[in-house]
Amino acid sequence: MKHAGQEALAELAPLLAQVREIGDLTERRPGVFYIKSRAALHFHEDPAGLFADLRLPGDPDFTRLDVTHPAGQAALLARLGSA
């Protein structure tokens, strides 16, 4: 599974706009977010769809979420909002 390219990130533009509003996240490269100095969120594209890898503070590993559809995007935003 490769990191999301420009076309995939363009598909996720509305989601990325909402993620960028979250104060604790810093976008170091397009679609790659950090909390302080620790990688927290990035995106992948795959024939099966678009996926987010999320690691919240206290989590040892990333959790993969399917963000191909609005329900998955809402789930990602909810997890970010609760952190």
Image: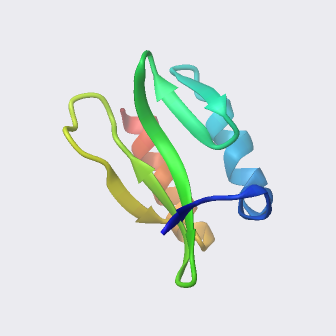
Viewer-side residue, 13 vs 30: 30
For residue 80, side relative to residue 21 (left or right): left
Q: Quadrant of residue 12?
A: bottom right
In the displayed structure, would residue 9 be above or below residue 19? below
Viewer-side residue, 61 vs 12: 61
In the displayed structure, would residue 72 be above or below residue 25? below
Place of residue 18 in the rendered image (x, y in percent of width and height, measured from the top left):
68, 41
What is the image's colouring? rainbow
Place of residue 47 in the rendered image (x, y in percent of width and height, measured from the top left):
57, 84
For residue 36, side relative to residue 70 (left or right): left
Viewer-side residue, 70 vs 41: 41
Place of residue 46 in the rendered image (x, y in percent of width and height, measured from the top left):
55, 76
The residue sitting at 60% across, 73% down in the picture is 69
The residue sitting at 62% across, 27% down in the picture is 28
Place of residue 35 in the rendered image (x, y in percent of width and height, measured from the top left):
44, 23
The residue sitting at 63% across, 59% down in the picture is 4
The residue sitting at 49% across, 27% down in the picture is 34
